[in-house]
Image: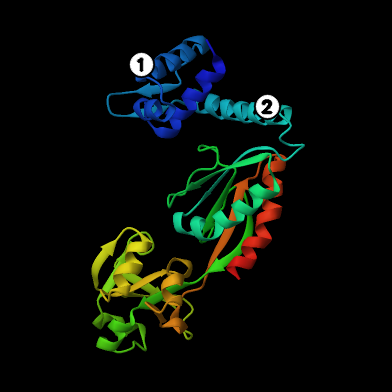
Amino acid sequence: MDRLEAMTILLRVIDTGSFSAASRALRMPLATVSRKVNDLESHLGIRLLVRTTRTLAVTEAGAVYAASAKRILEQIDETERVAAGEFQAPRGELILTAPVMFGRIHILPVVTEFLAAYPEINIRLLLSNRNLHLLDDHVDLAVRIGPLPDSSMVATRIGSMRTVICASPRLIAAHGLPNQPEDLANLPGVSFDVLSPALTWTFRRKDAKAGVDLPIRPRLSVSTAEAAVWAAAQGVGVTRLLHYQCADAIANGSLQIILAEFEIEPLPIHLIHAGRGVLPSKTRVFLDFAADRLRERLR
């Protein structure tokens, strides 16, 4: 029995919550996943998981074993990278993730410069609006927009981003320019589900310590920023977006920012990485290379 493989399979079963999900994630037959875990339990002489037709639970012994297995696999991974020279010389593959539009606008140009400067490093840029898990998804660096939860991750701040309310000149001409957030009650809205999943938008008032939530009247709800920009530019309604998502439309005049004095605090933007051990050289040089360039772009 390959115990390291069995540990990896066990951890993936626990992380995904089922044998079938682990099978898909590992691209391994379900029967093989089940057999490997059974073999591990037989070798240890203990029950690691309790399975029923509907649920999967980790036993107390299984939780202790899984925690130790995770540490062992992380140490092996780090040892192999040291042996490959990854910590001494900047080489190898760097895996980086960022939100789709932000990555295309700001990260990709910096990555292109970096690749020219470091020919022995390859980059896999994962553009996704879902926050990938750095350890589980084997990601070296991630861009995060918004407040960071308390965690063991190490964060490097690279800037901040405004959340803006936009409307087309056509809509403003037809309905008038809103002067107060309450004026939006008389205007149709375009809701971007990722940024504003609820039917309220938050505003900041100078005389209030906390934000004020006001209901909106969405005529259209969309799942991408590009769709929200296009619809708002056609006069469908007022929309709320992160500034970079609508910067081109503002620059060409198809949208204009309204109610700027009531904007919430800008959201922080960080590059984060797992805070364990010494950074591989490829990660360290990318942080050094990219941080100042991204701060300048975001300034």
CA separation, marks 2 and 1? 30 Å
Q: Residue at x 64, y 47 (%)?
A: 115
Residue in front for this viewpoint, 54 or 173: 173
**Which percent across, then down, holds residue 72?**
62, 26
State the residue at coordinates (51%, 37%). Answer: 136
- SS at badge 2: helix
Residue 230 falls in image quadrant: bottom left
Q: State left or right for residue 134 relative to residue 190.
A: right
Please tell me which residue is depicted at 58% across the width and 57% down the height of the picture. 109
First of labels 2, 1 by sequence position: 1
Check disc 1 and report the residue beneath it.
31
Question: Residue 47 location in percent, x, y?
Answer: 44, 17
Amino acid type, mark 1? Ala
- Determine which of the numbered discs, if any, sits on residue 80 in the image: 2
Does residue 279 appear in the picture of this structure?
no
Q: Nearer the viewer, residue 267 or 122?
A: 122
Q: Which mark is residue 79?
A: none
Whether residue 56 is situated above or below residue 263 in the rendered picture = above
